[in-house]
Amino acid sequence: MIGPRPMTGIAQRAAEQGWLKWAILFSASFGAILEVIDTSIVNVALPDMQGNLGATLSEIGWVSTAYAIANVVVIPLTAWLGYRFGKKRYFLFSLLAFTLASILCGMATNLATLITARVIQGLGGGGLLAKAQSILFETFPPAEHGKASALFGMGIITGPAIGPALGGYLTDALNWRWIFFINIPFGILALAMCSTFLPEDEPHPNQNNPIDWIGIILLTIGLASFQTFLEQGQQEDWFSSAFICRMAFLSVVGLSLFVWRELHTPHPAVDLRVLKYKSLAAGSMYSIVLGMGLYGAIFAVPIFAQTALHFTATKTGLLLIPGALASAVGMIIVGLLSKKVDARILIALGGIMTAGALYALSFINPDTGAEQLFWPLIFRGIGSVFMFLPLSIATLGSLPKKDVPSGSGFFSLTRQLGGSIGIALITTMVVKFQVVHRSELVGKVDLMNPAYADRINAAFTAFSASTADPVVARGQALSIIDQSINFQAGLLSYIDTFYIVAALFIISLPLLLFLKKGTSTAGMDAAH
């Protein structure tokens, strides 16, 4: 019987020096956490940026859109860039670009400069998450993937929750520029750690292959157009906008030609042939669903808290902290369970737990406060861990080592795009459902309705005490009723949205049947 081949390269050095692999893990993870936090830290500061830079609402939205576009374009190219320039050099370059771009963002005096700096920051940040995960799976033997992924995932899962809290505090206590300046000391520390502990690059057979410029251009056109379509669609009223129609057309044509090109060129910029591995294909498909539900839910709760419950940015951020801490604890539990329990069971448990948390959120009402949201957010945090970590192991753990970088890049891309799709859908659903519910509620505004009659008379009496003009008093009373209708319609729209996202997790569970068992010891021979 032929045993597994001996480890070489990074894994060999890690095995010889047991501490080294953990130093590599923490160094790479630190860089990835910076990128994850930065994707969510900006959102709470957009109103302050808008006022300070004199931008319109649609213009300031490009601060987030520009970063997201650059992010999704570079993620699938990370494997090729790592081969071309060396994994360590490319990771360090990405960190340096991210840190320098953070300085430029904080110093920006106009919107154009800020958006340009955000593009550079997105290009740097996009390489950090996918390469960090790739380095993890290449460094650790399969038997330790669960433990390593748990430590790596603690930052990746808690980052989106920490971001709004940190961003809200820095914006309220200092100003919006500090959400970028805060990256500088941590970026320098991450550069020092990665420069010290990441192993030197080894020659790669694809290093000197011709550059697939056509593939890169088609990828850029396709993904940039698709991300713009998702980010700006609701604001532009989707297909009623000629701009959005053009973005949709360019994304379909660009991505279709890109796929054809990559499957027919001998030296592709993105190796789509790795999708021949069923675990990667099925895991990436479920990753889209996970991104839609997970990041969509993370997005919906802060928006609901600020718009419906009128929480401040800081209070909204603090609302998410307990769930982030629960995720960290859940990572430790799942890391231990992943050695013994089928990954599909853990993912299903996480999906059911998250659906239950979202169902509990659907019981919100005008009296809902932070205490009513506490336990649903705790279980949402734990449920997300039960999905995120086992899915990574089941998807990437059994890939041959030579295909891990390409597989990791594609897997990260699907999760990122799933998040963008989820946010776009949730934003649209909230707006559309609010219009429907407002129409229904307005239809019930009738003086023959005792509840409405009592409400309008009470409001009219209250305002009559402060003004002698009955017309003014009646107008003020009707304004209060209108505000109440808008509030109720908004509340009902979020309830519907939470229902639908919960159902999405339950409906998608059959996809798990296409995954392999995926315990952290599975696929050991294949991985070597």
Image (cartoon, grey):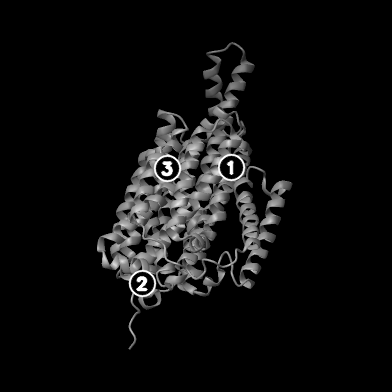
Between residues 160 and 383, which one lies in front from this camera angle?
160
Q: Of label 2 and label 3, which has the lower sequence position?
A: 2
Q: Which residue lies most toward the bottom here?
A: 1
Kindly indicate whether the residue at mark 2 contacts the one at mark 1 (C-beta within 8 angstroms): no
Q: Position of residue 187 (x, y in %)?
A: 40, 44
Q: Amino acid at mark 2?
A: Thr
Distance CA(mark 1)–CA(mark 2): 58 Å
Residue carrying label 3? 163
Determine the residue positioned at 32% across, 52% down.
328
State whether residue 301 appears in this view.
no
Name the kind of residue labelled 1 in the image: Gln
Whether pointer 2 and pointer 3 mark residues with C-beta atoms closer than 8 Å, the reply is: no
Q: Give 86 or 130, whichever is nearer the viewer.
A: 86
Q: Which residue is mark 2?
A: 8
Q: Earlier in the sequence, mark 1 or mark 2?
A: 2
Whole-percent x, y for residue 494 in the image: 51, 45
Mark 1 against mark 2, which lies toward the viewer? 2
Viewer-side label of 3, 1: 3
Label 1: state its secondary structure.
helix
Crowd rating for badge 3 (residues with CA inside 10 Å; few <14, some 14–19, many 20+)? many
- Residue beneath the point at 55% across and 68% down: 271
For the residue labelled by badge 2, is the local secondary structure a helix, a strand or a loop? loop
Q: Disc 3 residue type?
A: Gly
Residue highlighted by disc 1: 434
**Mark 2 nearby-residue class (10 Å; few <14, some 14–19, many ≥20):** few
Quadrant of the image occupied by residue 186: top left
Where residue 280 appears, x then y in whole percent? Answer: 48, 69
**Which residue, as the protein is rendered here, is positioned at the far right?**
242
- Figure check: 2 above or below 460: below
